[in-house]
Image (tube, grey):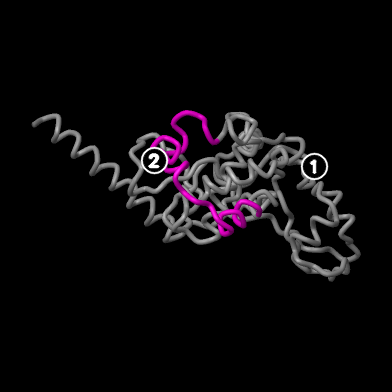
Amino acid sequence: MLAKSIARLSHLAIAAVAFLALLFIVAGQVEAASFRHTVAPGQTLEHIGRRFRVTVGDLLRYNRMSGSQLLAGQSIGIPGVAAHLVQPGETMSGLARRYGTTAELIRRMNQLGTDRLQAGQTLAIFRSPPPPLSLPDLRLLARMIWAEAEGESHRGRVAVGAVILNRMVHPLFPRTLQEVLFQPRQFQPVGDGRFWQVLAGEEALRAARDAVAGLDPTGGALYFYNPYRSTSRWIFTRPVLMRIGDHLFTY
């Protein structure tokens, strides 16, 4: 009886933490997003591309632009670059580790002469793109997206795909898609067999393609979970970036 009572109290404590986390996010969490650059007078797509290490073609496709003409003050989305809002206590080296990049590249991209950061500062942080996916791997990614996020919005599905791809370029995780997907105790659909049962159709493939193209609604998350279903105490200790649908995204 004592063991059952302790277990019941533990579950209640976890549920309480999840509820408080959701209240915090709904009340005031600012969503991370892909970085947006404000065009300066005289700037061209070539100038912007050189600074952020993207091609003019990528900028045109990402922003759905039919031509390369720019206006001063225009906002341009930068594919593969996260907009990170600096939090109190964060360091340049810590951000470099989190995003799988280097402090030097962060300084160069943001035209900074020092590693000193200020809370509230917005940084553009480059995320190295994962290796190109073969068609079979793209279908595997779509299958995992559908197994984890079938009931989510398109944005929520892309976010799940982005987490998987973020792991491929992060030093804490394997480098290939299959190694990431089948890493032990990482994705519940692999453990319970759902991964092999779902039928991933065009909606799942569209989300996978968008994630591979560099869309990341989470701004660099490495984990996600449903706070009402997760049984892992460890995941509740991770810093929460945002909520999309039923999932919390963390790093």
Left or right: where does residue 158 sit relative to residue 43? left
Left or right: where does residue 85 sit relative to residue 25? right
Q: Which mark is residue 224?
A: none
Question: The residue tagged with tag 2: helix, strand or loop?
Answer: helix
Q: Quadrant of residue 44?
A: bottom right
Residue at point 37%, 48% (across, down): 227
In the rendered picture of this protein, how many numbered marks are placed on residues? Answer: 2
Q: Is residue 184 magenta?
A: yes
Q: What type is the residue that disc 1 sits on? A: Arg
Q: Position of residue 144 (x, y in %)?
A: 52, 45
Q: Position of residue 244 (x, y in %)?
A: 48, 57
Q: Quadrant of residue 140?
A: top right
Q: Position of residue 91 (x, y in %)?
A: 62, 37
Figure check: 109 above or below 23? above
Figure quadrant of the N terminus: top left
Question: The residue tagged with tag 1: helix, strand or loop?
Answer: helix
Residue at point 34%, 46% (across, down): 229
For the record, the magenta segment spans 181-209
Q: Which mark is residue 236?
A: 2
Figure check: 231 above or below 25? above
Q: Nearer the viewer, residue 226 or 193?
A: 193
Q: Position of residue 79 (x, y in %)?
A: 72, 53
Mark 2 neighbour density, 10 Å: few (under 14) some (14–19) many (20 or more): some
Mark 1 neighbour density, 10 Å: few (under 14) some (14–19) many (20 or more): some
Figure check: 177 above or below 248? above
Task: Name the residue that disc number 1 marks.
Answer: 108
Q: Quadrant of residue 96?
A: top right
Alpha carbon distance from label 1 to label 2: 34 Å
Left or right: where does residue 104 sit relative to residue 10? right
Q: What type is the residue that disc 2 sits on? A: Phe
Q: Is residue 65 magenta?
A: no
Of the two numbered discs 1 and 2 on the same chain, state the one appearing first in sequence.
1
